[in-house]
Structures are given as C-alpha cells and as structure tokens.
Image (cartoon, grey):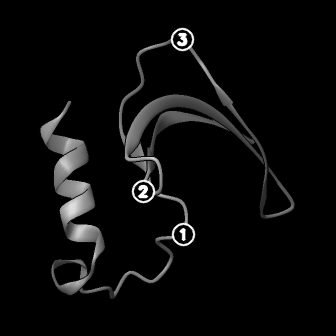
Amino acid sequence: MQIKSNLVDIDSREIRAVSIEVGDGFITSIQDIDEECFGYILPGFIDAHIHIESSKYLTIINDIFNNI
C-alpha cells in the first residue's frame, strides 16, 4: 500500500510531503516527494489516548504548525 501525505517529523521539527510504502503492516520505505499533499501522518502516535497537552511534544508541535 502507498500513502502520500505530510509527515510531521517531531525530531527534526519539519513537515514534509512524503510517499510511504507499507507492507505486512510495517512501513517499508519513506521517500520525500515534490507534490502537494493533504492530511498529516505522525509516526509513533499509536496510542489514541495521549495527553499531548501535558507532554514535551506540545511545544514542538506548536513550533511546527506556527511555521507553516
């Protein structure tokens, strides 16, 4: 399966358009692309019950989205 979306990279504090290949339930590759994409992917945010407002990631995510 191929997914094209905006990847939110918490570590590098970047959002970039990517093509993600998924096989057997795992990400097999991530490639930067030069296309406009809609939606956002946040790898690692598996637990839907996360209190992001009380985590260290809140300031990072605010920085990312304020620089779009």
Count of numbered tags: 3
Q: Element at badge 1?
A: loop
The residue most toward the right is 24
Amino acid, disc 1: Gly
- Disc 3 to disc 2: CB gap under 8 Å: no
The x and y percentages for residue 41 are 46, 50
Residues 66 and 30: in front is 66
Is the residue under label 1 in contact with that under label 2 (CB below 8 Å)?
A: yes
Of circles 3 and 2, which is in front? Answer: 2
At 46% across and 71% down in the image, what residue appears?
Answer: 45
Residue depicted at 36% across the width and 39% down the height: 39
The location of residue 2, given as percent across then percent down, is: 70, 36
Pointer 2 or 1: first along the chain: 2
Residue of label 3: 34
Q: Quadrant of the C terminus?
A: top left
Real-space Cα distance between discs 3 and 2?
20 Å
Label 2 or label 1, whichever lies nearer to me, is: 2
Describe the element under mark 3 as helix, strand or loop. loop
Residue type for callout 3: Asp
Q: Residue at label 1?
A: 44
SS state under label 2 = loop
Residue 44 drawn above or below residue 2: below
CA–CA distance in space, label 3 to label 1: 24 Å
* Real-space Cα separation, disc 2 to disc 1, in angstroms: 10 Å
- Rendered residue at 19%/64% (across/down): 59
- Residue where numbered disc 2 is placed: 10
